[in-house]
Image (cartoon, rainbow, N blue to C red):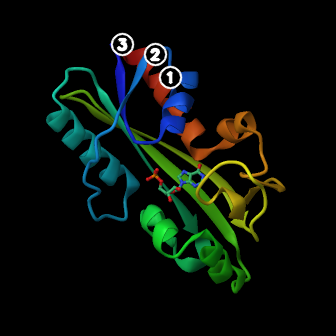
Amino acid sequence: MTIRFVTSNEGKVEEAREYLTEPVEQVDYDYTEIQSDDLAEIAVAGAKEAYEETGGDDPVVVDDSGLFVESLGGFPGPDSAYVEHTVGVERVWKLAKQEENRRAKFRGVIAYYDGERAETFAGAVPGRIVAPRGEGGFGYDPIFEHEGETLAEMSTERKNAISHRGRALAKFADWLAENE
Ligand code: IMP
């Protein structure tokens, strides 16, 4: 069995390969992101659509994540990608800067679908929003600080070990090992 990871992000596939013993293949299919404030619902709908539309037997996996700033009512949340590309990360910092409470969370959900079973695995990492620091990573990494370092200042190994996606992948790997 091969796990088909539906994403245009090669980095996510590499990360999945570090956690899973099964082979992981990248599938570049642009699934519909349904309107919802529930990451799991978005990811499951995407996994089902990708499974039906790409026509294969092997299970598919979709990953959906977002940044949730506590004092901004969870903004940008499931709209994180849209906000990153329209408003930009720097201006999300400027919004959060005006708040006393700068606590935030990265949340991620991995959805698995094999034509019959749909399963979801969630991971989260707590932190706070800070002025941009660091050159590594991508997306909101420079403004998200966890235990004194922004995700953009961490080594890839350290980021993967503590990240929302790493935590969700670890749960998924355990489940796969038990359910094969
Ligand atoms: P997606 O899950 O790839 O759709 O990502 C949703 C949004 O969250 C995008 O704006 C990503 O750049 C951002 N994002 C997802 N994972 C991370 C991360 O590990 N660090 C920083 N930003 C992330």
Q: CA distance from mark 2 to mark 1?
A: 5 Å
Element at label 3: loop
Residue 77 visible in the shown view? no
Q: Is mark 3 within 8 Å of ligand 1?
A: no
Left or right placement of residue 150 versus residue 4 in this view = right
> Is the residue under label 2 in contact with that under label 3 (CB below 8 Å)?
yes
C-beta proximity under 8 Å, tags 2 and 1: yes
Q: Secondary structure at mark 1?
A: helix
Q: Where residue 33 appears, x then y in whole percent?
A: 29, 56
**Direction from residue 161 to residue 33 in the image, left or right:** left
Image quarter (top left, top right, bottom left or bottom right) of the C terminus: top left
The residue wearing badge 3 is 180
Above or below for 113 versus 73: above
Mark 2 crowdedness (10 Å alpha carbons): few <14, some 14-19, many ≥20: few
* Residue bearing the label numbered 2: 177
Q: How many marks?
A: 3
What residue sits 72% from the left and 33% below the top? Answer: 157
Quadrant where the image shows the N terminus:
top left
Give residue 167's quadrant in the image.
Answer: top right
> Where is mark 1, residue-wise?
174
User: Measured along the vertical axis of the image, is residue 120 above or below residue 138?
Assistant: above
Residue 166 % position (x, y)? 59, 37
The kind of residue on which mark 1 rests is Asp
Residue 3 figure quarter: top left
Q: Which mark is residue 72?
A: none
